[in-house]
Image: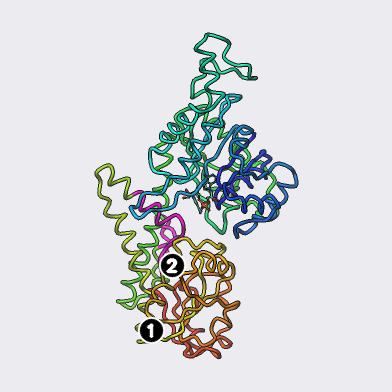
Amino acid sequence: MDVCVIGTGYVGLVTGTCLAWLGRSVTCVDIDERKIAMLGAGRATIYEPGLEPLLAQSIQRGNLRFTTDLAEAVRTAEVIFIAVGTPPQESGKPDLSAVEAVARAIGRALDGVRRRIVVNKSTVPIGSGNWVEMLIKEGLGDSPAFRREMANAAHGRAASTHSRPLPGAKADEFFLVASNPEFLREGTAIQDTLYPDRIVIGAADDYAAERLRALYEPIIEQTFTAPPSAPRPADCTAVPVVTTDLASAEMIKYAANAFLATKISFANEIANICERVGADIREVVRGFGLDNRIGPRFLNAGVGWGGSCFGKDVAALIDIANEYGYEPPMLRATVEVNRRQRQVAVQKLQETLKIIKGRTIGLLGLAFKPETDDLRDAPALEIAGQLLAMGARVRAYDPVAMEACRAQHPELKIEYADAPVLLAEECDALIVVTEWDEFRRLDLDAIGAVMNTRVIIDGRNILDRAAVEAAGFKYRGIGR
Ligand SMILES: NC(=O)c1ccc[n+]([C@@H]2O[C@H](COP(=O)([O-])OP(=O)(O)OC[C@H]3O[C@@H](n4cnc5c(N)ncnc54)[C@H](O)[C@@H]3O)[C@@H](O)[C@H]2O)c1
């Protein structure tokens, strides 16, 4: 099955590469020429474990290509994924300008040779399936092939000389729109794509749902050969498919992210109470997370959630609710708890050091979570900004996200260090901001020896408090 994926960011690139691994013939499109050149040469443009070998092998086998020519890529495909960014705006509404541009361009490129399925994989507000359909139709009005079909039909001539004539040349015989929200997590994106918890397909038409189901068949039935870099989990034998209407599919994505963000905000709220009453959030979560109605995941207290999706998607869901005259107090609380949690690391630093002005603070981690170089809405950026505004000198170390931070945030006057022990030099305190595995095994003696004062704020509760204190540090965790 021929596939076109438009947008080669975290979602588009991983989707395209994994579908190519399954044997689909995939063309990935982006407007960023630099990205397309790099990807075409088999080099990943993002840090994502296991991605580069799959990319290189699929290119070598000849079933993964990269281009900036959207029209040509659309013409060669049956299934067309829209996977462009939908970044947040001040109002809470996502910026849909890229989706709009792409939908119109798809319409202009459709030629009627076969019926295309256009799939919204980008996270988009409820009703976007219908909106995208409208935009494609508008673009289709400018499509030479469509105009020809319409003119022919009007003159009562045989509609087409194509291999599959389109009687009446109606728009829905050129294309159908479906929704297929994405649930991958950066850092485990390949595993999440090949072995997902579920696949959600939203469509108004059975044919569109059937074709998408056929596209994903090897994943649904788990019949593909697992790549060496992403072995199949022992318990993954088949993947459930949720086939539903467009609006419900769009809502499932928002509900999932809102729930996960709420879980973390809930844990942070309990952590703040734990701290006051002398309980330890880690023990508390261990105790209540074992209840299988609750589950232990997404309950780690820390400096708050971030990333490209949670903040944007919860804000969008609040905006959608408001648009329909509903005020969602729980979603607002999820956001508010997180906003406050972003202040906690600096508050603890103030309590411990008293004066922040003139101090040197080292940030362990910049990425919003481990195993990614993604800095979108990363707590580290906010913490660095707060400290700089307070007159501190800020240093940082991250195993993969430093280059991205330098390039994307020149406004943050951060000094970068190449290793934790180099970061620690002259620091008055360190803050663990991202729970990279290597921070669990810090050489505390070497680090302590080069610091001005031995203070660690463990913003992710990953360090062994007793070991840190035994090495002569003042330790402050979250909710402990
Ligand atoms: N990143 C995640 O973990 C994740 C998970 C699930 C869903 N999503 C959703 O998927 C969508 C994509 O997210 P992402 O993180 O991959 O975004 P991204 O910003 O990493 O990538 C978007 C890509 O689209 C390209 N693009 C923009 N306009 C274009 C155009 N007109 N034509 C062709 N390409 C264009 C950009 O150059 C970029 O490469 C968003 O809606 C997001 O909310 C993201």
Queried on whether the Cβ of the residue with tag 1 lies below 8 angstroms from ligand 1, the answer reads no
Question: Which of the two residues, 454 or 196, is positioned nearer the viewer here?
Answer: 454
Which numbered mark, 1 or 2, is in the foreground of this view?
A: 1
State which tag comes first along the sequence, 1 or 2.
Answer: 1
Q: Quadrant of the C terminus?
A: bottom left
- Where on the picture, by quarter, is residue 166? top right
- Tell me where residue 20 appears, x and y as whole percent: 66, 43
- Image spot of residue 395 (x, y percent): 50, 78
Q: Left or right: where does residue 68 sit relative to residue 228?
A: left
Q: Is residue 237 above or below residue 308?
A: above
Q: CA distance from mark 1 to mark 2?
A: 19 Å
Q: In what element is the residue under mark 2?
A: helix
Q: Nearer the viewer, residue 195 or 322?
A: 322
Magenta span: chief secondary structure? loop
**Colour mapping used in the image:** rainbow
Compared across the picture, whether 470 is left or right of 51 comes to left
Kindly identify the residue that appears in the image at 48 percent across and 44 percent down: 181
Could you classify mark 1 by the number of other residues whose Cα lies within 10 Å: few (under 14), some (14-19), or many (20 or more)?
many
Report crowding for label 2: few under 14, some 14 to 19, many 20 or more residues within 10 A (C-alpha). Answer: many
- Circle 1 — which element? loop
Quadrant location, the N terminus: top right
Q: In this figure, which residue is indicated by the disc labeled 2?
A: 379
Quarter assignment of residue 474: bottom left
**Location of mark 1 (residue):** 356
Magenta-drawn segment: 289-317
Q: Amino acid at mark 2?
A: Pro
Residue sitting at 60 percent across and 58 percent down?
A: 48
The amino acid pointed to by label 1 is Ile
Residue 158 location in percent, x, y? 58, 11
Q: Is residue 312 magenta?
A: yes
Residue 420 is marked as none
Which residue is at the far top? 156
